[in-house]
Image (cartoon, helix red, strand yellow):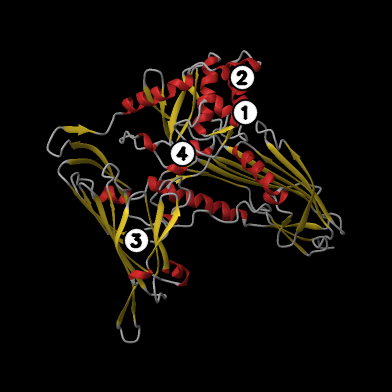
Amino acid sequence: SGTMHVGDEVAITIHERFKILDESALHLASRKFYYWGSRRMRSFKAQTINRDPATGEVRIDEVPKDEVYTVDVSGETRAKSVAFPNVQVGSILEYTYTLESEYYTSLEDWVFQDANLPTLYSSLEFHCADWLYYSILTLGKNLNTKYADAKENKKWALTNIRSFKDEPFVNNYLDYADQVQFQLTAYKQGRYGELVKVLEEWDAIARRIREYYQPYFRKDKEAERLLESLTLPEAQSEKVEAIYKAVQQRIAWNGRYRVLYDKDIDETLEIGEGNSADINLFIIQLLREAGIEAHPILISTRSSGKVLMSYPIISQFNHVIVAVKNGEGFQLVDGISKDLPLSLLPLEDYNYYGLLIQDKEATWLTFPEPGAAGVTYLVDLDLTNPEQITGRIACKYEEYEAFFGRQAWKEEGMKSLLGEQLETDVLNLRLQNPDVRYLDDPTKAFIVEADLYQEENPLFESEFLYIDPDIMGQFEENPFKSPQRDFPIELPFPTVKRIIYKLKLPEHLEVEDIPESTSFLLLEGAGQFVTSYRLSDDNLLDIRATQKLNSAYFKPEQYAELRTFYQQITDQMQEMAVFKARED
């Protein structure tokens, strides 16, 4: 529970209890409680509560004050470090403390859910001085259902809330968690005087950003020299790509997302690296000098969370990318990754919408979903030689799958993508002689091929042969295990996954059982799974499986069908083709 008092100072008192249910949670006996800046942590108390199972007697072990340590973590971040005594399975750990600060302009959000633990009860009380005015925003399904009609409410409580970890495939859990947020909108000057508004409109914020960027977009000799050094084609699409590549070759991203640039163009080019604003604002300047209309678009990355349009606050954004005018619409460009082609934005950019800063207006631009990324596995095996098994594997990675495939190959080679061997219950195929294509060309599909080899063939004289169609292990388990879900499903991108498995079988084998070819749809076309099994007259078995997911976003109410779809796939791919020796 929490109680927040806001006036000349902000004080929030937090009181929490949690129970150790099994040994896996014993590590929680050692805790750090973080705070930062000029905030102060006061009145810290902690204790362990145990009940004797035989007598029912309650024992309380308090943490002595001299065993609560203040530690410097990094920068302005500090923490109270404490080890709870006598912690065992069944213990209740209890603590309370008060956080104080002068930051009434920026209050902490109250999140009712825990990232890892289910919550039995969580509450917040809010008390505010009458000279301060806040906009209070309640987020989350449970909170808005319970308090739908309580617009002036200052106390909230929820019970029996699941943890975040039960909801995989979410860009940022705080986008959907039950929480209360506060934004200062106005205050009375001198407490009793004139009302001063604090919260701006989006147009005012856009105007300030436009003015801040203006010096960066003035004509620059370095930019002019760079453009003169490029042989720009006539077509706009080719011009954009040439400028995109030129900037990537000269400026490396330093890993920092920023809305504001750190340095001027000359210094950035001299150093050869910059933040995301340094890179993308330079692209905009070059495009404009080349006669192409381009504008900055402010976004919040996926991991940073969605922008709340009802809160005109620039701190919600952490990144700026490029919007290139293209007919009636805009082409979105982000130059921070040298391993992505112009046509693909970094996945972090796809966070629903951004604020487009044009010369005279600011508008919200809705982002499309990423395009579908494909991976195809072709496995060709010859089982007709009694002394060995030979074959070939070819893997084709497209779009974002190619991006991740290249990254993995550069880090660990073949082991990262395929492993050093393909193993099933009866096969132990070694991969050798890899052939890698387009490793350094992000505009093309990434292709890896290798020979397959096993020094003996235990299958040749088998009375029965069992063929697992999922030789690549792509459909081994359903990723959606929870029977229910509160959050939307946000997959990285739509996918197309194909397996083509060809086996040349010994002539002495004949069919005992082959699964039927199948096809089933997800949500009227949001996805599809198809399998086919064909055996030719010369004993060549052809197995094919294709999974298509045409969307990366699904609503919570679609979860049951999505989970069933994946379970059908898992069940289908566990059905084996069975062959037996022919009777003489």
Measured in 3D between alpha carbons, the distance from the residue under mark 3 to the one under mark 2, in whole angstroms, is 58 Å
| Residue that badge 1 annotates | 250
17 lies above or below 197: below
Q: Tell me which corner region of the image, top left, top right, bottom left or bottom right, holds residue 120.
A: bottom left
Measured in 3D between alpha carbons, the distance from the residue under mark 2 to the one under mark 1, in whole angstroms, is 10 Å
Measured in 3D between alpha carbons, the distance from the residue under mark 2 to the one under mark 4, in whole angstroms, is 30 Å
Task: Name the residue type under label 3.
Answer: Thr
Q: Are marks 3 and 2 in contact (CB under 8 Å)?
A: no
- The numbered disc on residue 17 is none
- The numbered disc on residue 301 is 4
**Mark 2 or 1, nearer chain start:** 2
Between 202 and 548, the one lying in front of the other is 202
Q: Tell me which corner region of the image, top left, top right, bottom left or bottom right, holds residue 175.
A: top left
Please tell me how crowded label 3 is: few (under 14), some (14-19), or many (20+) other residues with Cα within 10 Å: some
| Residue that badge 3 annotates | 119
**Mark 4 or 3, nearer chain start:** 3
Task: Name the residue type under label 4.
Answer: Thr
- The numbered disc on residue 226 is 2
Say which element carries label 1. helix
Say which element carries label 4. loop
Task: Name the residue type under label 1.
Answer: Arg
